[in-house]
Image (spheres, rainbow, N blue to C red):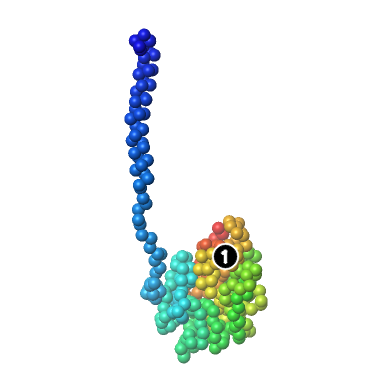
């Protein structure tokens, strides 16, 4: 019948017929693919628990050269990841040791995580005193023994879980000279709405000690006692609480802003003089500064006294 129609009309009918035949042929194969998809299953891949390093810190961070900071690990039942993490992130050379005779050979010694009446053997306190008189420095955290009060400049210590703010005193130590804004000088540790947060130690200073920072209850949070050419620094807040706690969002709502603040970094600062790190005719300081809350980075600013500070970021 198509012979009675014009050629153009015939071409349209031929094209339409071919399209219908093709669609009829493809339809069964599409149905088969749908049936095949129904039998697909996800691969059975085992999920393993996260691996945690159990390496001995004294082996993982060995003594290599004289300018390293000596991290004297006083209590093996308590870990050192808080201070180790911060030191590593900022590139401060250090080693971890349980050997007092090795630590005393280095100009800056960090005593961590705490010190009590059993920490030092007979004669070691005198060694620390001679070390500082000759120009060395010691930074200790959470010293609780009254017998160590004369070394670090305190007459009494009171632990508490109800201290929520550290207030720094600007200008009392060269290492604090960059803490020059209100947000840096008044550092929250937690929101008072929490009846208790982490433990802190508040100190009653001796007359020979300088209070670099204090808690809101008036007790000292950071002390410095000068010994000849060196000094002993004492901090009543654990690195574990102000570093690792924030990393896992255990900050007790200490942040001033919930997210994206445009203010100076909220930091908790423990500052110590480091005579062992020198340049010609320049005394260097190492400022150890840690986030107060929801700040996910750390600052270990190593500067020279008298140098123009770099712009803040």
State whether residue 13 is above or below residue 106. above
Which residue sits furthest bottom? 122
Tell me: 238 left or right of 3: right
Rendering coords of residue 89 (x, y %): 46, 65
Q: Can residue 59 be seen in this view?
A: yes
Residue situated in front as seen by the camera: 9 or 196: 9
Q: Mark 1 points at which residue?
A: 293
Residue visible at 55% across and 72% down in the picture? 270
Mark 1, residues whose alpha carbon is within 10 Å: few (<14), some, or many (≥20)?
many
Rendering coords of residue 201 (x, y %): 58, 79
Residue 164, picture quadrant: bottom right
State whether residue 313 is above or below residue 164. above
Residue visible at 58% across and 56% down in the picture? 260
**Quadrant of the drawing holding the C terminus:** bottom right
Residue 214, picture quadrant: bottom right
Tell me: 17 left or right of 184: left
Total count of labels:
1
Residue situated in front as seen by the camera: 160 or 13: 13
State whether residue 33 is above or below residue 211. above
**Quadrant of the drawing holding the N terminus:** top left
Rendering coords of residue 33 (x, y %): 35, 40
Q: Mark 1 falls on what kind of element?
A: loop
Residue visible at 62% across and 82% down in the picture? 204
Residue 226, picture quadrant: bottom right
Rendering coords of residue 250 (x, y %): 55, 67
Tell me: 310 left or right of 29: right
């Amino acid at each position: 019948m198509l012979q009675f129609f014009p050629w153009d009309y015939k071409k349209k009918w031929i094209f339409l017929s071919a399209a219908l035949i093709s669609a009829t042929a493809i339809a069964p194969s599409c149905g088969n693919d749908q049936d095949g998809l129904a039998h697909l299953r996800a691969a059975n891949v085992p999920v393993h628990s996260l691996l945690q390093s159990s390496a001995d810190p004294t082996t993982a961070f060995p003594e290599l050269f004289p300018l390293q900071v000596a991290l004297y690990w006083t209590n093996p039942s308590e870990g050192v990841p808080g201070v180790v993490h911060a030191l590593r992130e900022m590139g401060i050379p250090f080693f971890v040791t349980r050997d007092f005779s090795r630590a005393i050979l280095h100009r800056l010694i960090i005593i961590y995580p705490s010190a009590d009446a059993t920490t030092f053997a007979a004669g070691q306190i005198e060694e620390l005193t001679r070390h500082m008189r000759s120009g060395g420095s010691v930074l200790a955290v959470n010293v609780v023994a009254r017998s160590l009060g004369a070394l670090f400049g305190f007459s009494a210590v009171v632990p508490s879980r109800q201290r929520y703010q550290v207030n720094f005193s600007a200008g009392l130590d060269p290492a604090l000279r960059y803490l020059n804004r209100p947000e840096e000088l008044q550092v929250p540790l937690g929101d008072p709405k929490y009846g208790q947060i982490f433990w802190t130690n508040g100190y009653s200073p001796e007359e020979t000690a300088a209070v670099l920072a204090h808690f809101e209850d008036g007790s000292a949070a950071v002390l410095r006692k000068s010994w000849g050419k060196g000094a002993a620094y004492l901090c009543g807040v654990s690195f574990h609480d102000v570093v690792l706690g924030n990393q896992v969002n255990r900050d007790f709502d200490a942040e001033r802003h919930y997210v994206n603040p445009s203010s100076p970094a909220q930091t908790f600062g423990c500052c110590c003089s480091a005579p062992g790190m020198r340049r010609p005719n320049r005394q260097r300081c190492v400022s150890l500064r840690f986030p107060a809350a929801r700040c996910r980075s750390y600052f270990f600013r190593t500067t020279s006294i008298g140098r123009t500070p770099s712009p803040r970021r």
